[in-house]
Image (spheres, rainbow, N blue to C red):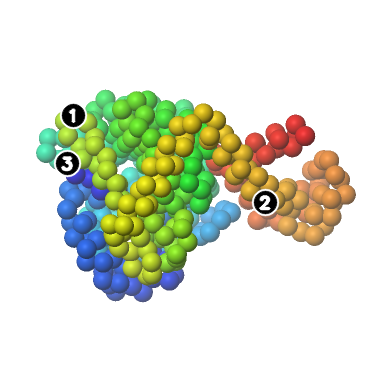
Amino acid sequence: MRLFIGGDFAPTNFNIEDFRRGDGTKLYTDELMAYLDSFDYRIYDFECVFEGCGEPIAKYGPFLSAPEETMPGILRAKPDLMALANNHAGNLGEEGVLHTVGIFEKYGIACVGAGTAADAGKPYVIEKEGLRVGVYACAEHEFTYAADGKGGVNAYDPLETFDAIRELKASCDAVIVLYHGGILDWRYPSPMERRVLRKMADCGADLVVGQHTHCIGCMEEYHGSTIVYGQGDFLFARPTRNDLRYSGLLIEAEVTGSGVQVSFNVRVKPQDTIRLADPEEKEQILKDFRERSEQIQRERFLEANFERYVDKRAAGFNSALAGSSMAGKVLNRLSGRRYKNQWIDGHMSEEDVLKLVNFLDCETHRETFLHYLKRKAER
């Protein structure tokens, strides 16, 4: 069985009319379309929600949605399975999630990683040629997750996720885990993310794919499994020559009775249209990918790299603690050492509070924020 896994995929304002028209030649080159045809099954992360049902949730961060009329352009990518475990599929709450699942089902496209509170965590099993491949999708905690009896996306939960992967492996020939998390626009995993994804492999995942970072990261072979730390986009956001978002990994998984063989191709987005990288581009991009993959095997490399990332976030954390209002910033400067509850209540906007919720609730943000605070305490 030959499977294709694309990265983050969503219609956005700059190309929504192309999606409405189903303008395949504008969105994807003919060569890319033929390449997609060569697979038995195609899987994407649909980082969006269809409009028409539900109300916007309170959250910090960008809000993505699209009308059902964009389906012609989505169908041109030949999706068989859409993973919805991400930080945008639940932007319109449970109603929006169920509406989105219903639209995909109407077009014969399966979904995994979101639904009612009872269904969000259920895996999807692909059966073909006498083989069973289980797909499990989960996301870090970023506002849109199923909780307290309400539906949404399936959140990573150490009390549930690892057991779910073990159970899935017991009934399948191979297991693929799609994990939506990690550091945006950063080519390496955090130390904790690496531990989590390695644990997924130890629990039976043959292939673990980290998505959400919007750039190609690195990978490792670990105890017989393949772990990708950052796949990059399939078709998402504006066209750019930015080194980070210009390219995205296309993951090819060949599943046989003896295991899963993983290989990589590359798509690039020089303008509006995504295309396969030419041979020279592909060679250079995968060379850099392999070099980063070698770097993370060095002792203490990830820890030192993570320190650099925390340094980049320091100013943002200070600003979040101060609040966005001028009064909050003045009080923060005057206090010097501590914050009083009434300052937070009186001088932090709703956006400020939601930002702090995100820092504390989301696994990657919490790891970074806590590391920053511990360094402050040590000093």
Foreground of the two, 223 or 43: 223
- The image shows residue 220, relative to residue 48, as above or below, that is above
Q: Residue at x 17, y 53 (%)?
A: 38
Foreground of the two, 204 or 138: 204
- Residue 52: x and y in percent read 40, 64
Residues at marks 2 and 3 touching, judged by CB atoms closer than 8 Å: no
Type of residue at label 1? Answer: Ser
Type of residue at label 2? Answer: Gly
Name the quadrant containing residue 366: top right
Residues under labels 1 and 3: Cα distance?
A: 12 Å
SS state under label 2: helix
- The image shows residue 25, relative to residue 138, as above or below, that is below
Q: Which of marks 2 and 1 is nearer the N terminus?
A: 1
Q: Earlier in the sequence, mark 2 or mark 3?
A: 3
Q: Name the residue under label 1.
A: 258
Type of residue at label 3? Answer: Met
Q: Which residue is drawn at 81% across and 46% down?
A: 342
- Residue 97: x and y in percent read 40, 52
Q: Name the residue under label 3.
A: 1
Classify residue 174 as left or right of residue 322.
left
- Residue 248: x and y in percent read 37, 54
SS state under label 1: loop
Q: Residue at x 41, y 47 (%)?
A: 288
Task: Return the residue found at the far right.
Answer: 334
Q: Which mark is residue 316?
A: 2
Q: Residues within 10 Å of mark 3 (few under 14, many from 20)?
A: some
Answer whether residue 206 is visible to the viewer in this image: yes
